């Protein structure tokens, strides 16, 4: 029973990570299209559209914050292994668990403080496009929640296969 629940949770986390990865790729494509369009309009037609920079900022924000959460899932987040490399195998396992707990705590804090920021700034709209500013400001709490889920999953399931093979070499 527990094994089936763990497999289901693993598949759910994997699905969320796949959707996150696809949304990041889409955000980067939109970002590049916006920047290319803005450059074309500014330098060829001397008339820069007001919305392209704002949309590019929204897509950049998602790609950056979503990439941070995806890094936790895939194990490519920024880390310094200098001290961990000096530890014994048992101590490395404990250090990895501590890092996982700290990462989960940071994700939870980012989600909580980001949600408070969304609450304070709700009702505003973006200057050029006029979309609700909550779209932009909700990215940190979403990223924090994903970081929390992925870090907890890493604590349960262990490090990704690529991280264990890298540390073994």
Image: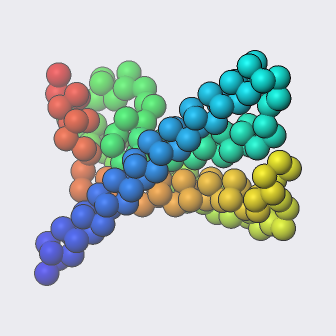
* Outermost top residue: 43
37 vs 153, left or right, is right
* Outermost bottom residue: 1
Q: Is 18 above or below relative to 92?
A: below
138 vs 108, left or right, is right
For the N terminus, the image quarter is bottom left
Confirm whether residue 72 shows in the render.
yes
Residue at coordinates 50% horizontally, 38% vertically from top-left? 29
Residue situated in front as seen by the camera: 123 or 162: 123
Q: Position of residue 65 (x, y in %)?
A: 56, 45
Q: Position of residue 23 (x, y in %)?
A: 46, 50
Q: Could you say which quadrant of the image residue 138 lies in?
A: bottom right
Residue situated in front as seen by the camera: 80 or 57: 57
Q: Is 142 above or below relative to 42?
A: below
- The count of marks equals 0
Q: Position of residue 112 (x, y in %)?
A: 64, 63
For the C terminus, the image quarter is top left
């Amino acid at each position: 029973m527990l094994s089936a629940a763990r497999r289901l949770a693993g598949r759910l986390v994997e699905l969320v990570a796949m959707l996150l990865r696809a949304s990041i790729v889409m955000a980067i494509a939109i970002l590049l299209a916006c920047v290319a369009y803005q450059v074309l309009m500014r330098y060829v037609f001397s008339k820069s559209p007001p919305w392209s920079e704002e949309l590019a900022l929204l897509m950049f924000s998602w790609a950056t914050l979503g990439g941070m959460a995806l890094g936790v899932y895939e194990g490519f987040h920024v880390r310094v292994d200098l001290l961990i490399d000096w530890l014994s195998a048992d101590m490395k396992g404990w250090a990895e668990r501590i890092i996982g707990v700290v990462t989960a705590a940071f994700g939870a804090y980012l989600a909580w403080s980001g949600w408070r920021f969304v609450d304070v700034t709700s009702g505003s709209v973006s200057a050029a496009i006029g979309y609700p500013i909550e779209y932009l400001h909700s990215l940190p709490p979403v990223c924090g929640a994903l970081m929390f889920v992925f870090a907890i999953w890493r604590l349960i399931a262990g490090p990704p296969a690529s991280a264990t093979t890298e540390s073994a070499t």
